[in-house]
Amino acid sequence: MKYLVCLLLLSMAACSSNEEREELRAYFYPENKEDKFYVYRDQTNGLDEQIHRIYTVKDSKGKHLVIERYNAEGRITEAYNYGLDSLLLDDYMVVDRDGKKRQAELFKNELFPIRRSGEMYFASRFPGVADSTFFLYEIKRRVEEEKVSKAMYMDKERQLLLCADHVRLTVFNPFTKKENSKESKVFTVYAKDLGLVEWFDEGKNVHFVLEQVLDRKEGLKLLGRSH
C-alpha cells in the first residue's frame, strides 16, 4: 500500500512539474522556420553589442534550438544547444582565445528556468590556455519574479520573467592544484513569446538590452558573412 502511495505522489509531482515547464515555455524563444538574429546593446557602454543567432535543428534525438553568441566584431564566442522537449541543455560549446571551438563537458544542464521555485543549476568544464588549466563555469539560477506588469520590448508590451543568477568561474590547474574563483550576481530577463531580452549585473556596469531582431539575410550581413 505504501508503495502505491509513493508511486501516486511521484506521478502527481511529475505532472505538476511538466505543467509548470509548459507554462514557462512561453518565455522561451519561439520556434521559427528560419534563423533569427537577436541584437543586444550594452546600455552602459553603447558601443558594445552582442549578436545571438537562433535556429532549430532536428536529429535522431528530436528537435533542438541552438543559440550561437557573437561579439561586436562578429566572432563566435559560445553556443548553447537546448532540447525543445525538455528545455534542458544537450550541448555547450566555447571558443578559446585562439578561435578554436571547444566542446565543453556538461555536469548540470539546467539553465533556462523550468520551474518557478527551487534552483536551476548549470555547470560546465572546458580546457583553458594550452590545456594546462581548466575552467569550471557555474550558474545557479532562481526565478525572482514573474511580473504581471508588462514592459515594452520590440514595440510590444510583454509579460516578463526575472531571474537572479549566482555566477562563478573557477580556473583550476591540475598540475599545481591551484584554483582561483570569481563570483558575481547577474539578473536575467525573459519576455513572453520572445525569449531573452535583457541581462545586467548588480551595479549595472554591464546592462545588455534587446535592440532588434533581424532575419537571416540581415543578420548574416551584420556579421559580415555572405548568405
Image (cartoon, helix red, strand yellow):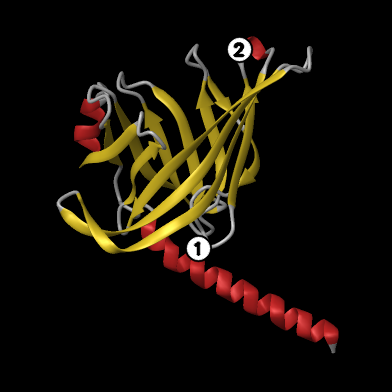
Instruction: Give the residue displayed 25% in from the left and 60% down from the top.
Output: 150
- The quadrant holding residue 225 is top left
Above or below, comparing residue 118 to residue 134 in the picture:
below
**Of 54 and 43, which appears nearest the observer?**
43
- Structural distance between the alpha carbons of marks 2 and 1: 38 Å
Q: Is residue 164 left or right of residue 213?
A: right
Sequence-earlier tag: 2 or 1: 1
Q: Amino acid at mark 1?
A: Arg
Q: Amino acid at mark 2?
A: Val
Mark 1 element type: loop
Instruction: Give the residue displayed 47% in from the left and 47% down from the top.
Output: 164
Above or below, comparing residue 168 to residue 57 in the picture:
above
Mark 2 element type: helix
Residue extending farthest to the front is 203
Return the mark for residue 203: none
* Residue occupied by mark 1: 116
Give the percent coordinates (x, y) of residue 44.
27, 28
Of labels 2 and 1, the one closer to you = 1
Give the percent coordinates (x, y) of residue 81.
50, 42
Return the mark for residue 129: 2
**Of 32 and 226, which appears nearest the observer?**
32
Give the percent coordinates (x, y) of residue 72.
30, 22
Q: Quadrant of the N terminus?
A: bottom right
Instruction: Give the residue displayed 58% in from the left and 75% down from the top.
Output: 15
Instruction: Give the residue displayed 45% in from the left and 51% down from the top.
Output: 163
Give the percent coordinates (x, y) of residue 93.
53, 31
Residue extending farthest to the bottom is 1
Q: Is residue 68 left or right of residue 102?
A: left
Q: Is residue 174 left or right of residue 117?
A: right
Q: Is residue 41 left or right of residue 205?
A: left
